[in-house]
């Protein structure tokens, strides 16, 4: 189904900041978040990025707002809230309470699955992508966007990249074995990152386990973005 004029306008406004619509989904009345004025949301779209698309806009904003706490969250709110309001929606963010099930939304909206590292893997972007917010819409606004299933169905039809990956290099590459089939041992990972080896390794070049995945390498983050995300995690 062709994108509506409203959808194209929203996509263009987000693209100016290096962001993109990552997927739509209709919401069940039993689990729909309540919007600010008390109405139930009827649908949502996820807003995020692939690779380093947003980094130039974010870096420029940081230069203009030095010393801002939680700069990526602050930037996301500064650029997405006005866009959501113009579109007739309401933006909610992973960093804010009440906590919303962003990973579940992403799996439902884009048909993605988790990688052995726990991060959702995209058939094109690999592990080099993220979500910055969800825009909630009431029934009337959702109807104007013509929420469709085509994109989700297309991604779901793609083979899960990890299914055909026999060696699972992502699980083998971590220098301290912090990733296992049971998930990430956060304390082991952070202890390593604080060590001299970690400061000269993953903290500079990025998570070695993540980089071992062969999917979507052309979307790999640049050095400045990589160091920023590692510092935020460590």
Image: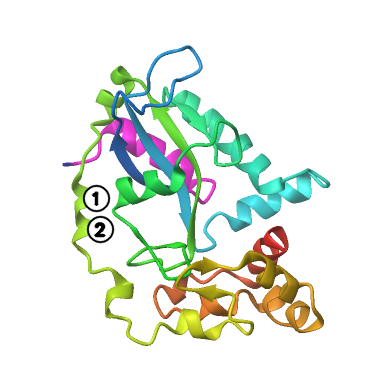
Label 2 vs label 1: CA separation?
6 Å
Label number found at residue 168: none
The answer to whether 205 is drawn above or below residue 22 in the figure is below
Q: Is residue 9 above or below residue 124?
A: above
Q: Secondary structure at mark 1?
A: helix
Q: Which residue is mark 1?
A: 151
Quarter assignment of residue 55? bottom right
Q: Could you tell whether 179 is left or right of 158 in the image? A: right
Query: Quick one: which residue is furthest to the left in this view?
Result: 1
Q: Are marks 2 and 1 in contact (CB under 8 Å)?
A: yes
Please provide the residue range marked out in magenta: 2-19
From the image, give the main secondary structure of the stretch colored magenta.
helix
User: Which one is nearer the viewer's eye here, 175 or 222?
Assistant: 175
Q: Residue furthest front?
A: 182
Q: Residue at x 76, y 82 (%)?
A: 200
Measuring 37% from the left and 38% from the top, which residue is drawn there? Answer: 45
Whether the magenta-drawn stretch holds residue 16 is answered as yes
Q: Where 96 sits versus 230, above or below?
A: above
| Label 1 packing within 10 angstroms: few (<14), some (14-19), many (20+) | some
Question: What kind of element bears circle 2?
Answer: helix
Q: Is residue 68 above or below residue 27?
A: below
User: What x and y, as percent, mark residue 145?
Assistant: 28, 30
Give the quarter of the figure containing the C terminus: bottom right
Q: Nearer the viewer, residue 125 or 171?
A: 171
Q: Which residue is mark 2?
A: 155
Count the numbered circles shown. 2
Query: Is 44 displayed left or right of 197 in the figure?
Result: left
Within-10-Å neighbours for mark 2: few <14, some 14–19, many 20+: some
Q: Residue at x 64, y 51 (%)?
A: 58
Q: Quadrant of the N terminus?
A: top left
Residue 141 image position (x, y, % from top left) = 33, 22
């Amino acid at each position: 189904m062709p994108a509506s004029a409203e959808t194209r306008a929203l996509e263009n406004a987000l693209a100016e900041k290096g962001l993109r619509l990552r997927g739509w989904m209709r919401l069940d009345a039993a689990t729909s978040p309540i919007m600010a004025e008390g109405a139930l949301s009827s649908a949502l779209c996820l807003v995020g990025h692939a690779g380093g698309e947003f980094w130039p806009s974010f870096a420029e904003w940081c230069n203009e707002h030095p010393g801002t706490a939680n700069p990526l969250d602050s930037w996301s709110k500064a650029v997405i809230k006005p866009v959501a309001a113009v579109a007739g929606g309401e933006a909610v963010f992973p960093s804010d309470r009440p906590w919303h099930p962003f990973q579940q939304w992403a799996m439902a909206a884009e048909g993605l699955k988790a990688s052995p590292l726990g991060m959702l893997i995209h058939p094109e972007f690999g592990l080099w992508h993220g979500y910055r917010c969800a825009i909630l819409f009431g029934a009337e606004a959702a109807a104007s966007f013509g929420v469709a299933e085509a994109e989700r169905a297309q991604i779901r039809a793609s083979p899960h990249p990890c299914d055909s990956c026999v060696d699972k290099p992502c699980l083998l590459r971590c220098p301290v074995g912090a990733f296992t089939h049971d998930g990430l041992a956060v304390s082991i990972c952070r202890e390593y990152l604080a060590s001299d080896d970690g400061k000269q390794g993953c903290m500079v070049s990025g998570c070695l386990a993540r980089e071992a995945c062969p999917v979507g390498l052309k979307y790999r983050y640049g050095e400045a973005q990589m160091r920023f995300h590692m510092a935020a995690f460590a």
